[in-house]
Amino acid sequence: MTTNKIWVITMFPEIYRPFLETGVAGQALRSERGQKFEFNTISLRNYSPNDFKGVDDSPFGGGAGMVMRADVLKNALIEGVVKPGGYDTEKYKEQLHIVYTSARGHQWTDSYAREFSARNWGVGKKKDLVFFCGRYEGIDERFLEKYVDEVICVGDYILTSGDLAVLNIIDSAIRFVPGVLGNKISAEDESFATPLLEHPHYTKPREFEGMEVPDVLLSGNHQKIEKYRREERERMTKKWRPDLWEKIKDLK
């Protein structure tokens, strides 16, 4: 079985420890579900030429904030990933797919998560993944132009750390790897898998603080249950995401 290697170059590797130790994504990355994975975090601070381990500097032209240095980023890529990973030092671009997160990137959606998962972890995949986690004002543009293959934006808002975006990407994409979710239907019948939100869910007890489980769910009539759930998906979308409903109502 092919091993899917993931490398994350970050200033704070400790962020990923609880992610790897808990939940479905953690089990998948420990190769306990679905395919075989190898997850590596590389501390960017270890690849700075400065004694004080500086990875950033003030921007040319002035301005607020600091910019992560291209030479440190490249050093981390070559010395932290390419050589230890056994990749060809001349042809590693053919063996690695390098990802950065930024507002300029491709918008991360459920459909793009599916595509990303299939492209990088599907049958016939040829490259391992490398994520660069930005901080401060971002990273030197020259590194982006020469080394980064794909830029992803997880939403129109600002995070303090690219690590949070990378965790988002890995967590949402790895769910689509065959065998990761216990029930394949789980990934097919949920919010954003279709244009509508999910229907409400109920379990025991049948009565909670005066509120009963809808009778139709106890009827055993699967046609009625499916009709009820379809209507509830529409109702929930209208109520909670009217913006989505406006986009899809004319398609019905």
Image (tube, rainbow, N blue to C red):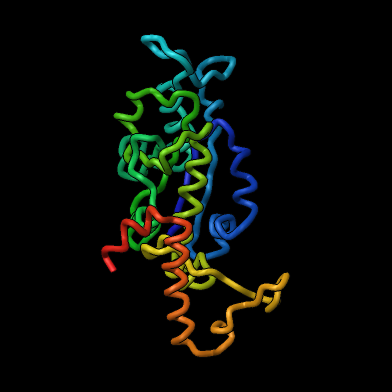
- Quarter occupied by residue 125: bottom left
Q: Is residue 186 left or right of residue 99?
A: right
Residue drawn at 53 percent across, 44 percent down: 40
Q: Residue furthest left?
A: 251
Image coordinates for residue 75, horizontal then vertical, percent: 44, 27
Q: Residue furthest front?
A: 210
Image coordinates for residue 116, horizontal then vertical, percent: 36, 53
- Quarter occupied by residue 67: top left
Residue drawn at 42 percent across, 42 percent down: 155
Residue drawn at 33 percent across, 53 percent down: 126
- Give the vertical position of 47 relative to 109 (above or below): above
Pick the residue in front: 101 or 21. 101
Quarter of the image for the C terminus: give it.
bottom left
Residue drawn at 45 percent across, 35 percent down: 132
Image coordinates for residue 50, horizontal then vertical, percent: 53, 15
Q: Residue furthest right?
A: 209
- Give the vertical position of 99 relative to 205 (above or below): above
Q: Is residue 220 left or right of residue 90?
A: right
* Numbered label tally: 0
- Give the vertical position of 118 relative to 42 (above or below): below
Q: Is residue 34 left or right of residue 144?
A: right
Quarter of the image for the N terminus: give it.
bottom left
Pick the residue in front: 92 or 60. 60
Pick the residue in front: 152 or 193. 193
Image coordinates for residue 35, horizontal then vertical, percent: 48, 63
- Quarter occupied by residue 82: top left
